[in-house]
Amino acid sequence: MRYDGRVAAVTGGTSGVGEAIARAIAAEGAAGLTIAGRDSARGERIAAELSAKGCPTRFLQVDLYRAEDARSVVLRTVEWFGRIDALANCAASTERSTLDETTPELFDRMMAVNVRAPMLTMQEAVRDMRRRGEPGAILNIVSVAARGGQPYLTAYAASKGALATLTRNVAHAHRFDRIRVNGILLGWTDTPHEDAIQRQAHGAGDGWLAAAEAAQPMGRLAKPDELADLAVLMLSERGGIMTGSLVEYAQDVAGCTD
């Protein structure tokens, strides 16, 4: 049980990758867990389910565009459970926009949710860990778009590039506090949100997933549950001394072409 006695918080914990990571942390024996998101009905249902299985879990409804909501993820966790040992920043805005389509308002919204919110949750988590003088671990779900991204991901790619740099900066700043900070550069992943984006933004039909998976080297897209296994490892003591690492979880190899 890699989380026995430890307390964790997960943003974006009501669906997709965030939900999978939250469920994996709970299954590993966490002493307390906060899942933060926008869907209150689903969040409360997941929290009740995980609590019934033995992991005390609280749901916190947040809009991460609001700075005070971002801070509250950690502040409420400490209020509820007395501490925070692990933080997973999984929530993100994935709005599409080319350079020409990116308005100042869209860009500011993307940076607020995808960069400022993780900065604020990390800030509060590090404060609690340092106050107690105990080690901790933080994981940021980044994206392979941090490499540059597609033309229709201008603002999103910029935000994920910033988050990748922020991850390494915080890792370097707090390594002597024994606070490990790492990121996962996630590739194309099969989630409910991705299905919605494909249909709404790209006009995809019911067969889009089968076609997309058939074209992948491994014959499928990444799945949230398998990513959660890696996330739990990185957040737990089994992550060893690794800090400042940006692990690519994708099927294309950066810098290589066919």
Image (cartoon, rainbow, N blue to C red):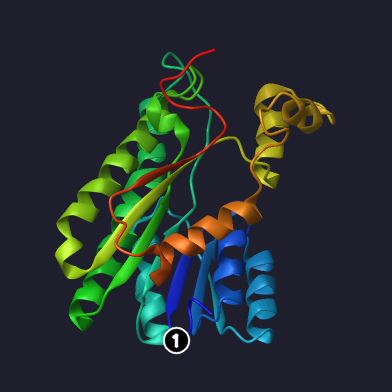
At mark 1, the secondary structure is loop
In front: 159, or 180? 180
Q: Which quarter of the figure has residue 217?
A: top right
Q: How many marks?
A: 1
When the figure is inspected, residue 150 is found, relative to residue 50, above or below; the finding is above
**Which residue does the numbered mark 1 point to in the structure image?**
5
Query: As displayed, is residue 114 above or below residue 156?
Result: below
**In the picture provided, is 251 more to the left or to the right than 90?**
right
Residue shown at the point (44%, 73%) measured from the top left: 8
**Which residue, as the protein is rendered here, is positioned at the far right?**
206
Q: Which of these two is toward me, 4 or 194? A: 4
List x then y, in percent, for residue 135: 27, 74
Judge left or right: residue 83 versus residue 30.
left
Which residue sits at x=41%, y=50%?
65
Does any portion of residue 62 appear in the rendered image?
A: no
**Residue found 15% across the figure and 56% down from its top:** 173
- In this rendering, the answer to whether 160 lies above or below 25 is above
Position of residue 27 relative to residue 41, above or below, is: below
Is 138 displayed left or right of 16 in the figure? left
Q: Position of residue 1 (x, y in %)?
A: 54, 80
Residue at (68, 65) in percent of width and height: 42
* Residue 223 percent location from the top left of the image: 66, 47
Q: Is residue 106 left or right of residue 27?
A: left
Q: Quadrant of the C terminus?
A: top right
Amino acid marked by disc 1 = Gly
Q: Is residue 215 visible?
A: yes
| Residue 159 point in image, percent of width and height | 37, 36
At label 1, counting other C-alpha atoms closer than 10 Å, the crowd grade (few under 14, some 14-19, many 20 or more) is few
